[in-house]
Image (spheres, rainbow, N blue to C red):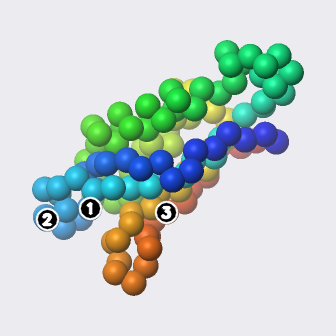
Amino acid sequence: MDTVFNEKLEIVTTIGVYDWERSIKQCLLIDLTIAWDNKLSAQNDDIYMALDYVKITEKVNKFAENSSFKLIESFAEQLANLLQHSFKLSWLRLKVTKPGAIASAKGVGVQIERGSF
C-alpha cells in the first residue's frame, strides 16, 4: 500500500471546553496519512495523477478556520469525514495534537483511522 502524508501541519482554530478557550484561537498540529496508489503518477512523472496534497492542506486550513469545536475528537471526526468525501479517499489516519494543553506534556490529542485499504 502506498501512502501520502502531511506531518505537523499547524492550523489555528477555536477549540476547547472552557469559556476562556472559546474566546481565543489555538494552534493544533495535524498529521495526516492517506492511502493512495502512487504507481501511475510515478511511472508517468505526472502531477495530475498524484494526490494533490496542496489542495488537501488548503481544505484542512479552511475547515479549521471556519470550525469551532469543544472536543478534539469532534474536530478529528468531522475533518476525516470531509476529507474522505471531498477527495474520495478509501482510507486515512488523522492525528490531532493540542500542544500545551497539559503543562507536563508536549501535547495531547487523538488519532483515528477511517475507511479500509
Q: Residue 95: in sight, yes or no?
A: yes
Of helix, strand and loop, which one carries label 1? Answer: loop
Lower position in the chain sequence, tag 2 or tag 3? 2
Identity of the residue drawn at 51% across and 27% down: 55
Locate residue 37 relative to residue 22 in the image: left or right. right
Amino acid of disc 1:
Gly
Identity of the residue drawn at 65% across and 27% down: 51
Q: Which residue is mark 3?
A: 110
- Disc ID at residue 16: 1
Label 2 to label 3: alpha-carbon separation: 22 Å
Task: Where is residue 50? Give x, y as percent.
Answer: 69, 24
Task: Where is residue 63? Give x, y as percent.
Answer: 36, 37
Label 1: few (<14), some or many (≥20) within 10 Å? many
Q: Residue furthest bottom?
A: 104
Above or below, 48 relative to 36: above
Pointers 2 and 1 in contact (C-beta within 8 Å): yes
Amino acid of disc 2:
Trp
Task: Where is residue 19? Give x, y as percent.
Answer: 13, 64
Q: Which residue is mark 2?
A: 20
- Disc ID at residue 29: none
Identity of the residue drawn at 82% across and 42% down: 1
Task: Where is residue 88? Give x, y as percent.
Answer: 61, 27
Above or below, 21 relative to 54: below
Pointers 3 and 1 in contact (C-beta within 8 Å): no
Amino acid of disc 3:
Val
